[in-house]
Image (tube, rainbow, N blue to C red):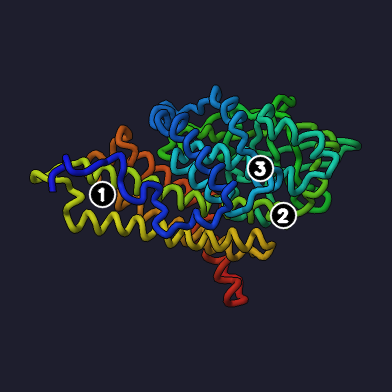
Amino acid sequence: MSKTTIDVDNLPYADGDFLAFEELLSDKERARLQEIRTWLTREVRPNAADWWNKGVFPRDLIPKIAELDPMSPVYRQGYSNLFAGIMHAEFTRADTSFATFMGVHDGLFTGSIEALASREQQEEWLPDIYAMKKIGAFGLTEPLGGSDVAGGTRTTARRDGGSWVLNGAKRWIGNATFSDWVVIYARDVADNQVKGFLVDTTLPGFSSSKIENKIALRTVENADIVLDDVVVSDDFHLKGANSFRDTNKVLKVTRLAVGWQAVGQQLAAFDVARRYAVEREQFGRPIASFQLVQQQLVQILGNAMSSMGMMVRLSQLEDAGKAKDEQSALAKAFTTARMRESVAAGRNILGGNGIVVDYEMAKIFSDAEAIYSYEGTQEINTLVAGRSITGIAAFV
């Protein structure tokens, strides 16, 4: 079969949805998904490698994102969790860094306000957040605290009359170099409980510095944050954030989103690897005609579809109000493990070109490592699921 017989712009199963999961969406949701997919194809994917190489988030894109209006598809717009998940997978498919920016601002940050702020706080803060006039970040992880922050953060909050005084440090905080607000989770020294605060990044004592030299999510401006006697009015204490159990209400939902990111990452790998395979000639014919290349493409697609099937079911449970923490943990652990296999196979299909960002796969391959680690490591999520099926905690 010669290369000229292959129409690379009209390959079968163009959307990669081999098992037609998108047919589970309503007509309105499918139309909206196509609108978002078209926007991402035009505005994000062609520029993603350049942004990644420069290591700078395209802040001038924010007004365009606001016009697209993807914010809070479930809580505010009334779409299903299944639609929100597939949409997030599409964000990731276009660019993982862009999806992570949205996951931080719309998921972790906005989700904290939606789930834990009082009605009065929501009415005051959410309009500007939804309009993206105020960009947010989520401050939980610390320089010496990742998986163990559930046991209490080192960052402290001390009540002082009608205010709180925050001291400590946070690390890996996406968007924090340019955000207007950060939700900071800190341990109340009075009762040892984790509480949440909306912190204006211009307050005295607040500083952030960009983490350099990353090999993944280079476009995301992760930062180190230092809080040095930052005074926050009690009006900015999230009234529903008074223990880590409250914080976990947010993490359960965003862990679901990371599972969808793993799906999107695999679909991105499939897109790039398949197109490369039908275009690249060796021994006088496309490498897609070789059995072992087809085997690897099918492995990527099979991993993606099994991951998507798990995420579809979990999103349906979330829509029904029946999803559990341990189910999100299992999904995150499973889908990210399959993702690692998929991006490795994709990189292998591209050979030497698989380590050059110009061909996209190197970026996809590298970004997968961040997805594998954040929102609970493979080990921690495995142990959460393990505890649920044995009744025995094996964390320490």
Q: In this view, does 60 lie to the left or right of 18?
A: right
Determine the CA span between mark 1 and mark 3: 37 Å
The quarter of the picture where the C terminus appears is bottom right
Residue 53 seen from this side = no
Q: Nearer the viewer, mark 2 or mark 3?
A: 3
Q: Mark 1 points at which residue?
A: 348
Amino acid type, callout 2: Phe
Point out residue 366 in the picture as x, y percentages from the top left corner: 38, 43
Give the mark, 1 or 2, whose residue is nearer the N terminus: 2
Rendered residue at 23%/46% (across/down)? 277
Q: Residue 72 carries which label?
A: 3
Amino acid type, callout 1: Asn
Point out residue 31 in the picture as x, y percentages from the top left corner: 54, 43
Look at the numbered discs 1 and 2 and tell me whether their residues touch, using CB distance below 8 Å: no
Q: Nearer the viewer, residue 53 or 285?
A: 285
Amino acid type, callout 3: Ser
Point out residue 197 in the picture as x, y percentages from the top left corner: 76, 40
Q: Which of 3 and 310 is in front in this view?
A: 3
Point out residue 217 in the picture as x, y percentages from the top left corner: 46, 38
Q: Which of 350 and 294 is in front in this view?
A: 294
Q: Mark 2 points at which residue?
A: 244
Give the mark, 1 or 3, whose residue is nearer the N terminus: 3
Rendered residue at 56%/40% (across/down)? 172
Vertical position of residue 269 compared to residue 221: above or below = below
Query: Helix or strand or loop: what does disc 1 sit on?
Result: helix
